[in-house]
Image: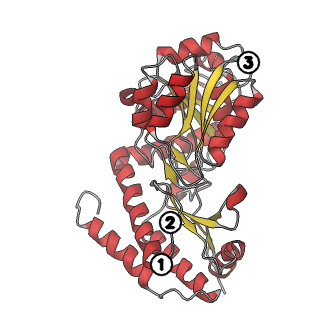
Amino acid sequence: MIKKLRIMTPGPTPVPVDVLLEGAKETLYHRNPKFKKMLAAASEGLKKVFRTNGHVFILASSGTGAMETAVANTISPGDKVVTVVGGKFGERWAELCRAYGANMHEINIEWGDYLRVEQIEKALKENPDTKVVFTTLSETSTGVVNDIKAVAEIVKNANAILVVDAVSGLIAEPLEMDKWGVDIAVAGSQKAFMMPPGLAFVAVSSEKAWKCIEEAKSPRYYFDLRAYKNKYTDTPYTGAVNLVYQLNKSLEMIESETLEMVWKRHAIFANAMRRGIQALGLELFAKKPGNVLTAVKVPNDIDGLEFLKVSREEYGMIFSGGQAQLKGKIFRVSNLGYVDRLDMVSAIATIEMTLNKMGKHVPIGSGVRAVEESLLEADKDESFS
């Protein structure tokens, strides 16, 4: 039987054909004036999605490279930092800070829970010499979203700078760098940008952040933001030419839809999926779910790894599983990037069929009905439909 693969994972995400075709264009020499013009256009477009008038740098790397760039450029060995650890990617901040010799204060949050502003206030009060606070907008491993606006309000009154992992959250969740006072934010191309993996972005919005970057003593070479700043209308190293073609097409599509509408679309789809999951009698994992994905607890009488296998091999639907201690215990349904209404209906239908095929009798059609009703309610808003 023919099976169409459908990716409902939080990265890589589906890529529109128009973006894919951009990658097939002629590869330019990276010092060609035409490429420099493309790079400048991409940098300006990125400022709009990061909501900053500051610098936004384009790196040939994954999102983790952008995270390492943020650490290497802001701390010196022995500097006091605060890291928020509430999932796999919060753990990554801690691992990177440890690798660069930081004196680290961890705010440990149970996976599935979210950061409280009081925890940041307490950490900064107990550690007044903190140089950097590292946290996460959307914790991809758990589906949790954190209140970065409230966190930024606390951090900007301290001597520290705020660095945010927005790798999965940017474009799907509101992030207002300049307005909120986020000093540095990082992201990757394979998420809501609707692009293949390969590019990472580092946005620096404040003079406070640049002072930190200039003073940092950590060893850095390829990821030295000072080099990128000096070559801002160019690139210090070979640029990922064809990915920049694709980036400009993606940014053009986002601007055409408007960023506010993209935020709204992600919120509507995430809400629809949550309603569908609950209509099936399943339990959400995140205590404060965001708009990037829906994390679902696997029923006790179902093998979580087998669920992923059946949904993939029988129905061609690819969901993400749990990571680390959550492996086999949750599955994650993304609505990130190039996803439409019928993708959401197909995803919930696959969950219904897979569970029933595995002997877990959930009411056929109840999840689909809930998702469709939610989407039809949203369609009453003419700006969305």
Q: Mark 3 — residue?
A: 77
Classify 69 as above or below 93: above
* Category of crowding for the residue at label 1, using alpha-carbon neighbours closer than 10 angstroms: few (below 14), some (14–19), many (at least 20): few
Q: Mark 1 — residue?
A: 281
Check whether the beta carbons of the residues at disc 2 and disc 1 lie within 8 A of each other: no
Classify 291 as above or below 333: above
**Left or right: residue 125 compared with residue 380:** right
Percent x, y of residue 183: 49, 25
**Left or right: residue 330 compared with residue 366:** right
SS class of the residue under badge 1? loop
Percent x, y of residue 162: 51, 27
Q: Residue at x 64, y 36 (%)?
A: 241
Q: Residue at x 48, y 62 (%)?
A: 339
SS class of the residue under badge 3? loop
Amino acid type, residue under disc 3 in the picture = Pro
Percent x, y of residue 72: 69, 24
- Asked if one can make out residue 242 in the rendered structure from this viewpoint, the answer is no
Counting residues from the N terminus, which is met first, the one under dot 1 or under dot 3? 3
Quarter the C terminus occupies? bottom left
Q: Which mark is residue 175?
A: none
* Category of crowding for the residue at label 3, using alpha-carbon neighbours closer than 10 angstroms: few (below 14), some (14–19), many (at least 20): some
Q: Residue at x 65, y 67 (%)?
A: 329
Q: Quadrant of residue 71?
A: top right
Counting residues from the N terminus, which is met first, the one under dot 2 or under dot 3? 3
Q: State the separation of the CA atoms marked 2 and 3.
A: 40 Å
Q: Quadrant of residue 14?
A: bottom right
Amino acid type, residue under disc 2 in the picture = Leu
Q: Which mark is residue 284?
A: 2
Q: State the separation of the CA atoms marked 1 and 3.
A: 50 Å
